[in-house]
Image (tube, rainbow, N blue to C red):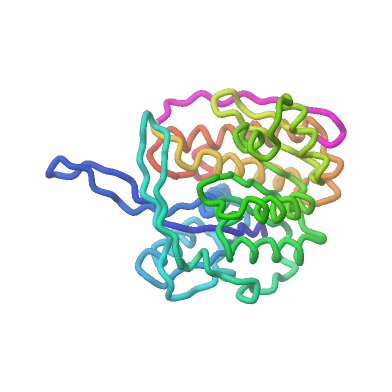
Amino acid sequence: MILCCGEALIDMIPAATAAGADGFVPHSGGAVFNTAVALGRLGVRTGMLSGVSTDMFGRQLVDGLKASHVDVSHLILSERPTTLAFVRLLDGHATYDFYDEQSAGRMISAQDVPALSDEVSALYFGGISLACEPGADAYASLLEQSAAGRAVMLDPNIRPGFIRNIERYRARLDRMLALSDIVKVSDEDLNWLISGPLSLREKTEKLLSKGPAVVILTRGGEGATGYLASGEEVHVPAVKAEIVDTVGAGDTFNAGVLAKLSELGHLHKPALADLSADVLAEALAHGARVAAVTVSRAGANPPWAEEL
């Protein structure tokens, strides 16, 4: 089982009303939630670990996971409110206003996290859950305690506005990077992580030196490049699509990569440490294909396997 660890929240998506003004429609979302749903729909055995409310929005999140065949036995339920993200779309690109104080997702602690059984073979971390304390510390602690013998993928998906203490965030992220096998970053993420007048390739080499075996760099419409610790690199173009919006595109790309690595039998530490450029290219191409379906329709609505 791939266990996706991080936020599950409600995206409030604008929609026209009969009166003419925009209203907001609640859609289940969050970077890690989207990846879990995409994996489940692609037919990969998947679970989710997150703090989830027992309120009406929390019930919507649980129902959405179950409908996409995601195991919910690792969810940490509480009466705290659900995180809400109000989305504004401009030319198909999303910006967000978050309401997250004292939320069910943000306020989990290391003591709340259940022990993982041997059926969990891989871990996925990402999103704002890596920045919002105290929950961020709970996820870092989970990784430190559970990474041995499990493949780990990390997508920091950096949102500077969520980082209250940059020094603590960087130190926590460095610890997590050192335990990760695959790290996915956008060009914006990479430039935030490693500042200075270096090329993206040079910055990627610095990121590889922190511990991961694979770094995947995405650049929107320019596609994705995978870098291996051996020095090899591969590039795959973005799959052309008529873009409705980009909500969840990166999250479903990650799911496509993980799904293909799992299908090929390479989603475990020894295989990732010795990953070939050909296998990485196949995984990246699958991620691009899955993401192209998601951007072609409104909201984070990943495809089912039969749609591909």
Left or right? Give the position of 71 relative to 151.
left
Residue 104 horizontal/vertical position (percent): 48, 68
Residue 303: give x, y in percent of width and height: 49, 42
Residue 135 location, quadrant: bottom right
Q: Is residue 301 left or right of residue 89?
A: right
Q: Is residue 262 above or below residue 188?
A: below
Residue 234: say if magenta. Answer: yes
Say whether residue 281 is left or right of residue 78: right
Residue at 55% x, 39% y is 250
Residue 240 location, x and y as percent? Answer: 51, 23
Residue 57 percent location from the top left of the image: 37, 64
Task: Judge whether residue 300 is colored magenta.
Answer: no
Query: Looking at this view, is 93 or 61 the one in front?
Result: 93
Q: How many marks?
A: 0
Q: Residue furthest left?
A: 19
91, above or below 120, in the image = above
Q: Residue, x 51% and y 32% (percent of image)?
A: 292
Q: Nearer the viewer, residue 129 or 289?
A: 129
Magenta-tinted stretch: 228-243
Please report the residue visible at 52 percent of the width from the left and 42 percent of the height from the top. Answer: 306
Which residue is painted at 65% across and 62% down in the image? 139
- Decide: is 270 above or below 142: above
Which one is in front, 270 or 245? 245
Could you tell me which quadrant the N terminus lies in?
bottom right
Q: What's the magenta bit mostly, secondary-structure-wise?
A: loop
Q: Quadrant of residue 136?
A: bottom right
**Quadrant of the rendered structure where residue 114 is?**
bottom right
